[in-house]
Image (cartoon, rainbow, N blue to C red):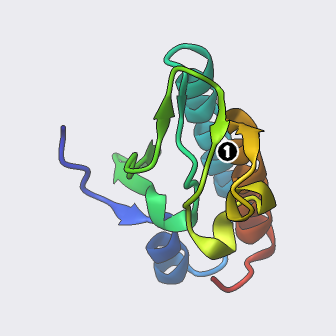
Amino acid sequence: MPYVDGKTLSEFRVDFGMLDKNIKFDIINQIFEGLYVLHNEYHVYHRDIKPDNIMIEIKDGIYRVKILDFGICKMGLNESYVRGGSMLWSAPEQQDNEFVDQSKIDVYCFGLLILWLMYEFKS
């Protein structure tokens, strides 16, 4: 596993303050592309998408986004019971331990992350 020399999205936002909307859109797009590949090519469902699990690496002025911490990810079968994730960043069905489509959990958490990033809510 390669070392990522960067900051979590939470740290990045604190260090750089108000981010330009184009940088925000670029970060969101890269996270989306990563989730798309995870879900559609590898059938991996992260289940804990949040700012502390997104790393931003800057090389030569280019922002590279990495998705980290696959500790509670699910591979293969898309539907199962799920429990876990971070309370503030998890889908309601995660907290209720319901039988769910795993990709929907990532989509819900990704939506929360977009709101957090675009409107600069506190974590």
Q: Is 94 situated left or right of 60 in this image? A: right
Who's the residue at 66% across and 67% down the image? Answer: 89
Which one is in front, 120 or 82? 82
Please identify the quadrant where the C terminus is shown. bottom right
Question: Which x, y percent locates residue 33?
Answer: 61, 30
Relative height, residue 78 to residue 102 (above, below): above
Please identify the quadrant where the N terminus is shown. top left
Which one is in front, 88 or 5? 88
- When asked about the image quadrant of residue 86, the answer is bottom right
Mark 1: which secondary structure?
helix
Question: Which x, y percent locates residue 50?
Answer: 58, 62
Who's the residue at 74% across and 81% down the image? Answer: 121
User: In this rendering, does residue 52 appear at all?
Assistant: yes
Who's the residue at 67% across and 75% down the image? Answer: 88
Q: Which residue is mark 1?
A: 106
Relative height, residue 31 to residue 118 (above, below): above
Which one is in front, 71 or 40? 71
Who's the residue at 47% across and 71% down the image? Answer: 12
Question: Which x, y percent locates residue 72?
Answer: 44, 49
Q: Residue furthest bottom?
A: 122
Question: Which x, y percent locates residue 39?
Answer: 60, 25
Which one is in front, 46 or 118? 46
- When asked about the image quadrant of residue 66, the answer is top left
Q: Is 70 situated left or right of 5 in this image? A: right
Relative height, residue 40 to residue 80 (above, below): above
- Total numbered circles: 1
Q: Residues within 10 Å of mark 1 (few under 14, many from 20)?
A: many
User: In this rendering, does residue 19 appear at all?
Assistant: no
Q: Amino acid at mark 1?
A: Asp
